[in-house]
Image (cartoon, helix red, strand yellow):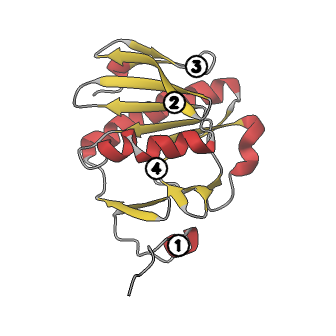
Amino acid sequence: MVRGKLVLTYEDYLQMPDDRNRREILGGDLYVTPAPTPRHQRVLVNLAETLNRWVRNRALGKVFPSPIDVVLSQVDVVQPDLVYVSADRLQIVTTSSIQGAPDLVIEILSPSTAGVDRGRKMETYARFGVQEYWLIDFDARVAEQYVLEDQTFRPTNRAEGDQVLTSALPGLTVDLSSIWE
C-alpha cells in the first residue's frame, strides 16, 4: 500500500504544543528548531532597535521581532527573526499573525537554521513576494542583502565586520558594529 505525503496546514500548526521549539511549515513540511541562543537574541534586539528607530522616525510602518507567525499560504507558515511591514500594507497584520509577505525579512543564521534559511525559506519568501531579504551571520560577522527580481532574490549587498549595510529601502543603513555586541 502506498501512502500519500502528509501535508501540514496552518490549522495543524495552530494545534501544535508551545514547548519553546520554533515550528515552521514550508510547502506542508514541518521544520522544528530549538529556541535561539542568547547571542542570537542580542543580535536580534540590536537589529530590531535600529530598524524600529528608522521606521518610527519616518512613520513608515511596523517592525515585528520573532516569534511572530507569518502566514504566506495555508501550507507555508514561517517565523522570521525580524520583519518590516510598510504603512501602506499594514492591513496584512491581524490580531494573531501577519497574513502575507512582509516588505523586509531578516533571518539571523544559526547552525540549525542556516541551510533552510539560505535554501527553502529563501525560495519561499521570493515566491510569495518579500521585496528584500537579509541574512545575518553573527559568527562570521557578515550581513547579506538580497532584493526580489522576477520572483528570485538577487544578491545586492554584502557587509562585513564593522562596515555599513545599506538597504534598498530609502534611508535605511545599519552600522554592523552596533549589532555584534
Tell me the crowding category of disc 4: few under 14, some 14 to 19, or many 20 or more residues within 10 angstroms, Cα based. some
Q: Is residue 151 left or right of residue 20?
A: right
Residue hosting label 2: 153
Q: CA distance from mark 3 to mark 1?
A: 34 Å
Q: CA distance from mark 2 to mark 4?
A: 22 Å
Q: Amino acid at mark 4?
A: Ser
Q: Residue at x 45, y 77 (%)?
A: 4
Residue hosting label 3: 168
Chain-order first, disc 3 or disc 4: 4
Q: Nearer the viewer, mark 1 or mark 4?
A: 1
Q: Amino acid at mark 1?
A: Leu
Residue hosting label 1: 14
Q: Amino acid at mark 3?
A: Ala
Tell me the crowding category of disc 3: few under 14, some 14 to 19, or many 20 or more residues within 10 angstroms, Cα based. some
The x, y position of residue 13, in whole percent, is 50, 70
Q: Judging from the image, what secondary structure is the residue with disc 1 in?
A: helix
Q: Is residue 81 visible?
A: no
Tell me the crowding category of disc 1: few under 14, some 14 to 19, or many 20 or more residues within 10 angstroms, Cα based. few
Q: Residue at x 45, y 31 (%)?
A: 134
Residue hosting label 4: 66
Q: Residue at x 28, y 58 (%)?
A: 34
